[in-house]
Amino acid sequence: MNNYDDIINLPHHVSKNRPHMSNYDRAAQFSPFAALKGYDDEIEEVARLTDEKYLLEGTRVEEINEKLLLLKETVGERPLVKIVYFVPDGKKAGGAYLTVEARLKKLSEIERKLILDNNLTVSFDDVYDISLPNGSL
């Protein structure tokens, strides 16, 4: 006698209480799952590249300071300026250099900030370059 002789020829059981499950739903029960929640996000974050902030020295600092002085004299005219500046990354070391073109609203020497008409505030220490689109700086 075989171990399964008593059940081998019985008809397939059909539940009276539960609806028949489709093959798709049945297969979904065995699909892979994320055993380490957030792991993929962490890997993506580590792989994300950031730039290092350049340490400006000597003539470069003097050049930017001269441009800031010229802007101070013309701030009342609300000149259109193009600024390349550094934005620190909130999650890891480094950051990114961004370029913005907007009208200068205010130059605060006390706070050491440029305030643009789009309400963006840029610290003097984060400025990498300043120019006027018409080339006068």
Image (cartoon, grey):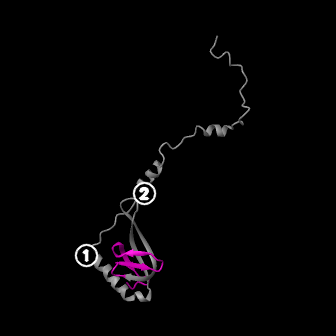
Q: Name the residue under label 2.
A: 48
15 up-or-down from 117: above or below = above
Q: Which residue is located at x 43 percent, y 82 percent?
A: 104
Please give the name of the residue rendered at 74% of the width and 32% of the height, measured from the top-left corner.
16
Q: Is 93 on the left or on the right of 25, as rendered?
A: left
Within-10-Å neighbours for mark 1: few <14, some 14–19, many 20+: few
Disc 1 secondary structure class: helix
Q: Where is residue 37 in the image (x, y as percent from the top left)?
A: 48, 47
The residue that appears at 27% across and 73% down in the rendered structure is 57
**Nearest to N terminus: mark 1 or mark 2:** 2
The span shown in magenta is 108-137
Q: Going by the picture, which residue comes out furthest to the front?
A: 17
Q: Measuring from the top left, give residue 27's x and y in whole percent.
A: 62, 38
Q: Is residue 50 left or right of residue 24?
A: left
Displayed quadrant of residue 128: bottom left
On residue 58, the disc is: 1
Q: Does residue 72 sit above or below 127 in this rendering?
A: below
Tell me the quadrant of the picture where the N terminus can be found: top right
Q: Cα distance, mark 1 to mark 2?
A: 32 Å
Amino acid type shown at disc 1? Gly
Where is residue 129 drawn, in percent x and y? Answer: 36, 76
The type of residue carrying mark 2 is: Arg
Displayed quadrant of residue 89: bottom left
